[in-house]
Image (tube, grey):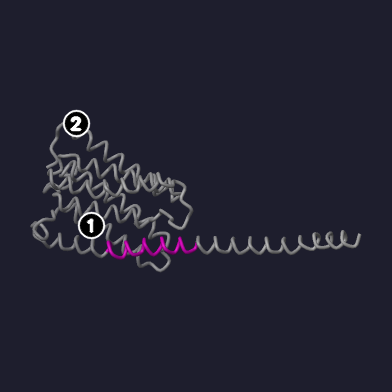
Amino acid sequence: MGDGGGHGSQRGGRAPGAGRERRSLGRDGGLRRALRGRLRGARRLLTARLYARTAGPLLVLLGIAGIFSGGFPLFGVLNVDPFENLLHLASGFVLLYAGFFPRGGRLAGVVSLVAGALYAFVGVAGIVVPNLFGLTPGGLGLADDLVHLSLGVFGIASADLDRRDAPPTGGAGRRTVGYAAGACLLGGPVLALLTGGGGGGVLVFCVGLILVGVRTLMGGGDRTVGWVMVFVGALAAVADLTRLLLGVGAG
């Protein structure tokens, strides 16, 4: 009897301690998750601000230099047109504002994403239609296109939204998609340079952009960023595929 009572007492005595331990672990886990969420947000904010503070001044300088270039190509390779000057100045000042405005945290992310999508589209469209439907009579060269594509890719990437601290949901498939995306993003411009824009390099780059969006969606990242990349890549891919099928030259 005594032993049974002792065992019963021990069994009864374990529950409150175990419950307190579970509650403590639950609180600690919630705190860690909250801290990780704040760190992810801070990292994305700093990345977007860095892009805005870097690309903004660069674009403003390009716009000003284009105005005073007398119509001659900048550095001998970059096209100069009123539309390009206006685009560079407008986007540059908006990025500067978003990057340095004290309370523009979320604004920096949104502006970087929009600017990235815009320049990715302009970069791809510049290879498909060098005069941008008459907006740039001088015609965009491959140097212009690569500058625009770089601004686009880094702008979209700065809006991060891969959330590396979040548990990935795609596993090995997500890594494979990431490797394929990287190969397309690097190989596309190289192929475009080697073939003068007529060998499908733009299409390869567009596929890479789509794959980056798919990887973002697979990894539990920001769905808006993922779908923006998929949409821009698909739109440009359709345009370039149409050009290739019709046999229209890129330049």
Residue closer to the observer: 139 or 181? 181
Work out how far the residue at label 1 is from the one at label 2, CA to CA, in angstroms: 32 Å
What residue does disc 1 label? 88
Quick check: 232 above or below 21? above
- Answer with left or right where residue 225 lies relative to residue 240: right
Give x and y (percent) for residue 200: 19, 39
The mark total stands at 2
Outermost residue, right direction? 1
The range drawn in magenta is 38-56
Residue closer to the observer: 107 or 25? 25
Secondary structure mainly formed by the magenta segment: helix
- Answer with left or right where residue 196 lies relative to residue 186: left
- Quarter holding the C terminus? top left
- Residue at (41%, 53%) from the top-left corner? 162
Quick check: 196 above or below 12? above
Give x and y (percent) for residue 31: 58, 64
Crowding at mark 1 (Cα within 10 Å: few <14, some 14-19, many 20+): many
Give x and y (percent) for residue 4: 87, 59
Question: Tag 1: residue type?
Answer: His
> Is residue 39 covered in magenta?
yes
- Residue at (39%, 49%) from the top-left corner? 225
> Is residue 54 covered in magenta?
yes
Contact between labelled residues 2 and 1, with CB atoms less than 8 Å apart: no
- Quarter holding the N terminus? bottom right
Residue closer to the observer: 141 or 3? 3
What residue does disc 2 label? 245
Q: Name which quarter of the figure residue 56 lies in.
A: bottom left
Q: What element carries label 1?
A: helix
Q: What element carries label 2?
A: helix
Q: Name which quarter of the figure residue 27 lies in.
A: bottom right
Quick check: 184 above or below 6? above
Question: Tag 2: residue type?
Answer: Leu
